Amino acid sequence: MSTQSDVMVLGAGMVGVSAALHLQKRGRSVTLVDRGGVSDETSYGNAGIIQVEGVVPYPFPRDPMKIAQYAFNMLPEAHIHYTALPKLAPWLWRYFLASDAAGQARTADGAKPMVLASIREHEALMKEAGIDAMLRRTGYLRLYRKAEAFDAAVTKETADRIRYGINFEAVDGARIKELEPHITETFHGGLLMPDPMSVPDPGKVGKAYGDMFVSRGGRLERGEARTLRQVAGGWEVLADHGPITAREVVVCLGPWSDDVLHKLGFYIPLGSKRGYHMHYSARGNATLNRPVLDTDNGYVMSAMTKGIRLTTGAEFARRDGLPTPVQLDRVEPAARRMFPLDARVEETPWLGRRPCLPDMLPAIGPVPGLKGLWADFGHHHLGFTLGPVSGRLLAEMMTGETPFTDPRPYRVDRFA
């Protein structure tokens, strides 16, 4: 038996479930389709920060020395699979080209209205879902061991504050101890980013949004997005309980979105940065008051429901290749020197994939040449942050409302 709805949303991560909720609010009947559960992939494994300060993107490095260090896997925040380079090279080259000063400025200008609205949109959904108590007004802390690195960071953040309004506080080693008394290592200085918020379980937030969607009459189905095809009057996907049809469909499949688009004849240069996490118990009564970033080693630690979550930097590998959590093994000793971690809570590290377009902006809007097909993916490191606000923008575009911000920076065909 076929299930019919106005809109079918493919992918039930933070981006997909948020899009489904916003479309539902505007009177559309929506079916949310995923091969697994809600927030089981990348939306589960992030650092749990709503990065309202994250206007300026993570660029490809321009310093030749740093590029050489990354190329030879000398720095723990990045790891390259050499066997994957033939496939990754075209995307990496476009990422490099988009990371010059002008490209970073274009991306930051495009990202600013979305990023600045991210907390407001999360707050609204969390209140409606009855989980607003999970929202922690913690900010987060970036830590620096070397004076020159700290001074350079202060200079950069000062410029970003002038241009983009990003708030920060430079703190010395004594202030770091006041903010985080259980940190056991001495740092030269830190940057306290006071405006971001955090949650103790990002996967649970996504699942609460999914429960709210279903409670309001939405349909949640297991299905295979790669079976998407055009049919008379719309689109069809094969699901466990039969075909699902809809007049319009939204692709919110994160790093797997290009699988569907390429099959339909539309090319978009989507790459992925893989990342790992592990939970640890803490010795004694040690705890963290906010997420902390070790800038020398590229990992973040944050207090989560399951324990202290240690998240790694970026791994450049085949999207669906076997896990190789060498970065976690490299940074764990540094994390233990910095904070009294105890035993690992899980046997196996978690692996996630961040969907990245070369300019580090998402693709939001209609897919040219394919009537009724819409995109909402490519949120790079900010999927958890931007899910609700990008869902709002998409729903406004699909229902003919005036978008709250100019959607042109996120055009799907901007790489043509």
Image (tube, rainbow, N blue to C red):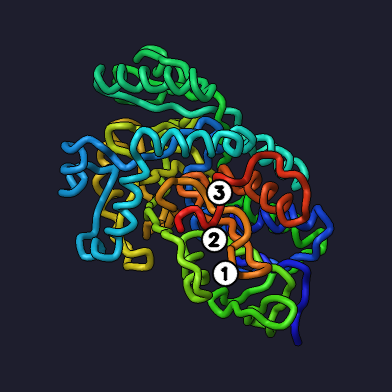
In the figure, is residue 196 to the left or right of 371?
A: left
The residue labelled by disc 1 is 36
Cα–Cα span, label 2 and label 1: 7 Å
Q: Are marks 3 and 2 in contact (CB under 8 Å)?
A: no
Q: Residue at x 73, y 73 (%)?
A: 246
Query: 348 or 379: nearer the eye?
Result: 379
In the figure, is residue 375 to the left or right of 317?
A: right
Residue 16 lies, with reference to residue 308, above or below; the image says: below
Cα–Cα span, label 1 and label 3: 28 Å
Q: Position of residue 80 (x, y in %)?
A: 24, 54
Q: Residues within 10 Å of mark 3 (few under 14, many from 20)?
A: many
Residue 11 in sight from this viewpoint? no
Q: Position of residue 158 (x, y in %)?
A: 43, 17
Cα–Cα span, label 3 and label 2: 26 Å
Q: Residues within 10 Å of mark 2 (few under 14, many from 20)?
A: some
- Mark 1 or mark 3: which is in front? 3
Which is nearer the N-term, disc 1 or disc 3? Answer: 1
Residue 40: which numbered mark, if any? Answer: 2
Residue 410: which numbered mark, if any? Answer: 3
Q: Residue at x 27, y 23 (%)?
A: 149
Name the kind of residue labelled 2 in the image: Asp
Q: Secondary structure at mark 1?
A: loop
Q: Residues within 10 Å of mark 1 (few under 14, many from 20)?
A: some
Name the kind of residue labelled 3 in the image: Tyr
On the rendered image, what quadrant is the N terminus found in? bottom right
